[in-house]
Amino acid sequence: MSTDERFDAILLGMAQQLTAQNPGTGVKDLLEVFFSFMRRKTDFFTGVGASGAEAMVLEVFNKHRGIAQEAEEKKRKKLREQEEARRKASEQLGTESKVEMLDDDEDEKVKTKREKERLEREKKAAKDALLRKEEEEERAKKLKENPDASEPEVTKGLIPNTGNGADLDTYSWTQTLQDVEVRVGLDKKYKSKDLNIKISRNKLCVGIKGKPAIIEGDLQGTIKEEESMWTLEDGDTVVIHLAKVKDMEWWKMLVQGSEELDLQKVQPENSKLDDLDGETRQTVEKMMYDQRQKAMGLPTSEEQSKNDILKKFMTQHPEMDFSKAKIC
């Protein structure tokens, strides 16, 4: 995702809320919110650089106006080329309408997109099955080599995708400790008014009006309703942002009753860890370490600490019999 697109979901959500409150003034109200923030939270208007503030705003405005005008010209050129192609096709075929051609083309693009996503899911499922087989073989090998060792824990559930969520048949989701992103691919292009989407503290419903819901149920955890929102991307994909109330735990599923994740295989990116404060990062790294230790049949950090205390006590009291003491 480019730098320009990182905050699209948040800004679009703000714009939708402002438009709903005061139809027809969404853009102006959005600017009012931004400059109000700059006035209240920074010295943009009164600081050392205040004299250049207006020039700075105009510089950014002119930059993006140029980009927008260039993009608009490319769009018009493409439309002219498409119109010319349709005109020639219409002359040859005689009966096909321009609107029908466009609709058919768009629907075909969406079908191709969904098929590509399906193939990617099948590819990951095959890869995950192979990984599970290798883990079972490694587990059996360890038990054979050392029958007295504690048995490695058998992990179950879906292996997380690269975003620590899951790619399911009708939707995919990813997560960090703080939030969840859900992407629902639709069968064709729709408008926002065609959709039925409800987000509450404990429930989520996503669907198309007049059709069965695609997602409906109780969420795995509680969310901050005021910080959660949805947008329609490209007309064929619903993107939902959910802000977790408990920001120190991983969800094993999006909604109750869906397939569970194998949380022992959650792998936060280093860049994400760098964003955390020292105490939170230490806690997350401890969770990750304990998960890896359990998967290998080795003691967790807490068990290691207890072992160290016991060994120290044994050293200090050689006269005592510790033959029946259990050390992990």
Image (cartoon, grey):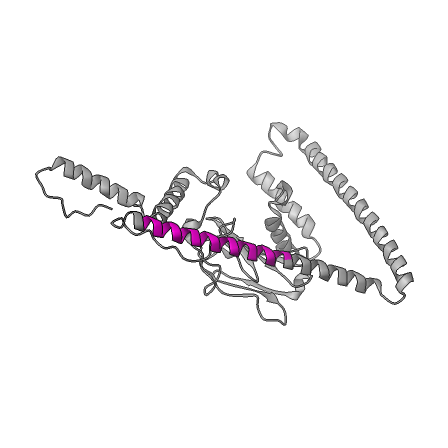
Q: Is residue 4 visible?
A: yes
Residue 192 x/y as whole percent = 66, 61
Residue 123 x/y as whole percent = 56, 54
Secondary structure mostly taken by the magenta-highlighted segment of the chain = helix
Say how many tags the image has: 0
Residue 115 x/y as whole percent = 64, 59
Give the residue at the far right of this rendering: 91
Q: Which residues are magenta?
A: 116-143
Q: Is residue 21 visible?
A: no
| Left or right: residue 6 compared with residue 263 | right
Instruction: Using the image as rendered, state which of residue 258 and residue 249 is in the foreground.
Output: 258
Give the residue drawn at x 63%, y 28%: 49
| Residue 308, quarter of picture | top left
| Left or right: residue 218 compared with residue 169 | left
Give the residue drawn at x 52%, y 56%: 126
Give the residue drawn at x 58%, y 71%: 212
| Residue 282, quarter of picture | top left
Q: Quadrant of the N terminus?
A: top right
Instruction: Indicate yes or no whether the magenta region holds residue 92.
Output: no
Instruction: Using the image as rendered, state which of residue 29 and residue 134 is in the foreground.
Output: 134
Instruction: Using the image as rendered, state which of residue 216 and residue 196 is in the foreground.
Output: 216
Residue 236 x/y as whole percent = 66, 59
| Left or right: residue 210 compared with residue 293 | right
| Left or right: residue 54 compared with residue 184 | right
Q: Is residue 65 above or below residue 17?
A: above
Instruction: Indicate yes or no whether the magenta region holds residue 141.
Output: yes
Give the residue at the far left of this rendering: 319
Give the residue drawn at x 33%, y 48%: 142
Q: Is residue 196 above or below residue 264?
A: below
